[in-house]
Image (tube, rainbow, N blue to C red):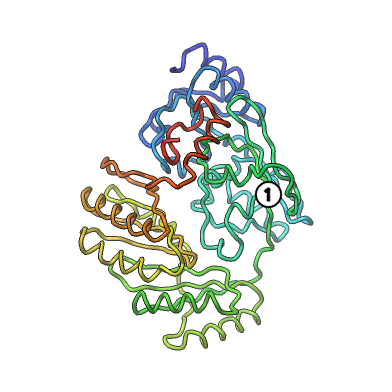
């Protein structure tokens, strides 16, 4: 169905006429245009909007800050754009319990600034924190280099409330770190691209802010040397917080390592690292290498594809060697930022045909070696499939979608297998 004046009026009556408007070209989702933008002011209004749209057979696309709205497949249809930006409050910071409850429309920057008043943080370095919202970061499962020390988003979230398409508000988890009661809804909706329910609030565990930081960078002469050094660091007694590899197109490999703690401890860590590496020694970084992932995105243009690639940590050398061969054969340029865990971002620049060939070759290598490649950004209309080969769990994913959203109201078609 498509939106009608009567349905639009009903939606306006839920959120208030001043919080509903006709969609414009800036509200498109990966080239798909919506009809109406509504901005609920609380969880109850979110649930009512969803129930109304679900009953009318309308497709709903949730939106936070809009920073990752192009991730995933384009939706099959988009009638209502559901903005969560009015749900922007930090509800409760239980600093003594190291937990925080926050609404989904709160930006990561606002959340971190609030926590910092008590010397704490959510140990997460998402892209574009000034605009990215809690709900959007969770829905896209966007985490950076800090996951090496503190875990992924699914390790940091301990509770969630979501609005289901039938208007139900479902809550799972609790306010304490050890609470494991109930179905693990927080982990289920993390990374689901809003296809199961709309996240309205989340509860995170927090960590103390680091007193001091030290970033060191060292070169690797070739992928095999890189592999040996990274594995040696990972297998050592070093207490590093982050470890990443940067490689410009056909450029040299550089490795960045981050330590956090007190001055004396940082000095001891640096001394141990230098002894482990031998020559060449690691040097203190003049710039901020930890912005490399975001810079990779900021430098994208009309001839770019950006993909998230996942490989086994033991396959780093083989991955970079494969990338070298693929660049030469497919004639594209690439920039890579890879974590020691084997999770990385690759930006490919080239013609439509070279990008098609490049993505296909890198994906084939990754999947053949137990990994994956997901295209997150593509401005070419060349039909590169976003998700790659569906996992064995696709039938289970479809069953969950049917259970949570039987009418395919939420983000239809955006997830794996067209879910």
Q: Position of residue 322 (x, y in %)?
A: 30, 65
In the picture shown, does residue 311 fall above or below 272? above
Q: Position of residue 310 (x, y in %)?
A: 43, 58
The secondary structure type at the circle numbered 1 is: strand
Q: Which residue is mark 1?
A: 158
Q: Quadrant of residue 85?
A: top right
In the picture shown, does residue 107 fall above or below 266? above
Left or right: 333, with 13 as reference point: left
Q: Which of the two residues, 393 or 219, is positioned nearer the viewer here?
A: 393
The residue at the point 54 percent across, 71 percent down is: 258
The residue at the point 50 percent across, 46 percent down is: 140
Q: Which of the two residues, 181 or 57, is positioned nearer the viewer here?
A: 181
Q: Position of residue 269 (x, y in %)?
A: 59, 81
Q: Position of residue 413 (x, y in %)?
A: 42, 34
Q: Which of the two residues, 395 or 145, is positioned nearer the viewer here?
A: 395
Left or right: 355, with 289 as reference point: left
Q: Quadrant of the C terminus?
A: top left
The residue at the point 46 percent across, 44 percent down is: 67
In the picture shown, does residue 325 fall above or below 105? below
Q: Quadrant of residue 182?
A: top right
């Amino acid at each position: 169905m498509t939106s009608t004046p009567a349905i639009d009026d009903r939606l306006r009556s839920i959120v208030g006429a001043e919080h509903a408007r006709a969609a414009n070209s800036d509200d498109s989702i990966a080239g798909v245009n919506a009809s109406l933008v509504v901005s609920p002011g609380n969880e109850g209004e979110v649930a009512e909007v969803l129930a109304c749209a679900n009953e009318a057979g309308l497709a709903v696309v949730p939106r936070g800050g809009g920073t990752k709205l192009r991730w995933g497949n384009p939706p099959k249809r988009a009638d209502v754009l559901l903005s969560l930006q009015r749900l922007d409050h930090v509800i409760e910071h239980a600093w003594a319990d190291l937990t925080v409850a926050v609404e989904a429309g709160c930006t990561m920057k606002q959340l971190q600034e609030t926590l910092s008043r008590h010397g704490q943080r959510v140990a997460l370095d998402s892209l574009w924190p000034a605009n990215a919202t809690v709900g959007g970061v969770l829905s896209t499962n966007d985490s950076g280099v800090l996951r090496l020390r503190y875990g992924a988003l699914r390790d940091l979230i301990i509770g969630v409330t979501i609005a289901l398409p039938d208007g139900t508000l479902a809550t799972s988890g609790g306010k304490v770190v050890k609470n494991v009661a109930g179905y693990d809804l927080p982990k289920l909706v993390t990374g689901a691209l809003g296809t199961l329910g709309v996240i309205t609030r989340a509860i995170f565990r927090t960590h103390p802010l680091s007193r001091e930081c030290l970033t060191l960078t060292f070169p690797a002469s070739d992928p095999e040397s890189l592999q040996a050094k990274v594995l040696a660091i990972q297998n050592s007694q070093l207490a590093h917080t982050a470890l990443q590899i940067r490689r410009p197109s056909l450029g040299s490999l550089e490795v960045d390592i981050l330590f956090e703690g007190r001055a004396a401890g940082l000095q001891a860590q640096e001394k141990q690292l230098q002894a482990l590496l031998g020559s060449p020694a690691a040097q203190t970084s003049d710039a901020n290498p930890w912005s490399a992932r975001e810079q990779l995105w900021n430098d994208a243009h009309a001839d770019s594809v950006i993909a998230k690639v996942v490989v086994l940590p033991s396959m780093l050398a083989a991955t970079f060697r494969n990338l070298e061969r693929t660049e030469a054969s497919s004639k594209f340029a690439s920039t890579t930022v890879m974590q020691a865990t084997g999770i990385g971002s690759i930006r490919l620049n080239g013609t439509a045909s070279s990008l098609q060939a490049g993505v296909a070759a890198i994906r084939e290598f990754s999947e053949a070696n137990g990994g994956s490649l997901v295209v997150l950004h593509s401005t070419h209309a060349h039909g590169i499939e976003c998700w790659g080969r569906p996992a064995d769990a696709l039938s289970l994913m479809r069953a969950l979608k049917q259970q949570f959203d039987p009418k395919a109201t939420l983000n239809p078609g955006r997830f794996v297998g067209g879910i």
